[in-house]
Image (tube, helix red, strand yellow):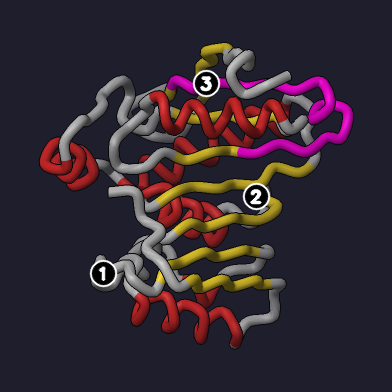
Amino acid sequence: MSAAAAASTTVSLQTENKKGAVPGHLFESAEGKKKGVALVVIQEWWGINSEIKSKGAAFQAKGITAIVPDLYRGKTATTDQEASHLMSELDWVGAVQDIKGAVQYLKSAGYAKVFVTGYCMGGALTLAASVLDGGNVAGGIIYYGICDKKLADSINLKVPVQCHFGTADSYPGFSDNKAAVALQTTLKDISTSVRFVIRLLLLRTH
């Protein structure tokens, strides 16, 4: 199945977030179901737009079941200003609880291993979920985002992660080269499997 032909199902994910159940877009793959491996895909600061849905569809087309939780619960942005406002209003603790709900949904559906990936804001939340829900998250694939240590300190990471950053990224303390190298140094000191990729380009999409 091609990404263009892929289709999602809207599901309701139970969560400990005080806002209640979170909507999720499930891109299920029969091949992925057979393998027992699935992926939670976390949005950028724009919300659930066609771009992030296309990520779920692309994974589905490759035989991987993916679920995209709507952390903004229906809100989306089309400008940097709107996106910045939505991200600043996000309850990050609640967002991690939503991600946990997505992971648990997939595990309850029979997927033995559930990984998490995300982009920018989603990358930072991927790191947080990998640290805070290591008993359920099998591993994380982080694209240019680092969460606040007050939310989740990467020194406590216990699951494998793969990290992707760009040297031309200039978001200070979040995804710039200095922050990326600091994270890389921290992860070298802990006993878990880590692959760190710092490319000579800008990776953020906003």
Q: Tell me which label, 3 or 2, sits earlier in the chain.
A: 3
Query: Residue drawn 25% across and 41% down?
Result: 90
Q: Tell me which label, 1 or 2, sits earlier in the chain.
A: 2
Query: In this picture, which residue range is highlighted in magenta?
Result: 23-39
Query: Quadrant location of residue 45?
Result: top left
Q: Amino acid at mark 3?
A: His
Q: Which residue is mark 3?
A: 25
Q: Is residue 1 left or right of residue 116?
A: right
Q: Amino acid at mark 1?
A: Ser
Q: Please say whether residue 131 is one of the residues in the magenta stretch.
A: no
Depth check, mark 3 against mark 1: the one in front is 1
Q: Tell me which label, 3 or 1, sits earlier in the chain.
A: 3
Query: Residue drawn 33% across and 24% down?
Result: 73
The foreground one among 91 and 115 is 115
Q: Which residue is mark 2?
A: 137
Q: Secondary structure at mark 3?
A: strand
Q: Please say whether residue 26 is one of the residues in the magenta stretch.
A: yes
Q: Residue 149: x, y in percent?
A: 36, 70
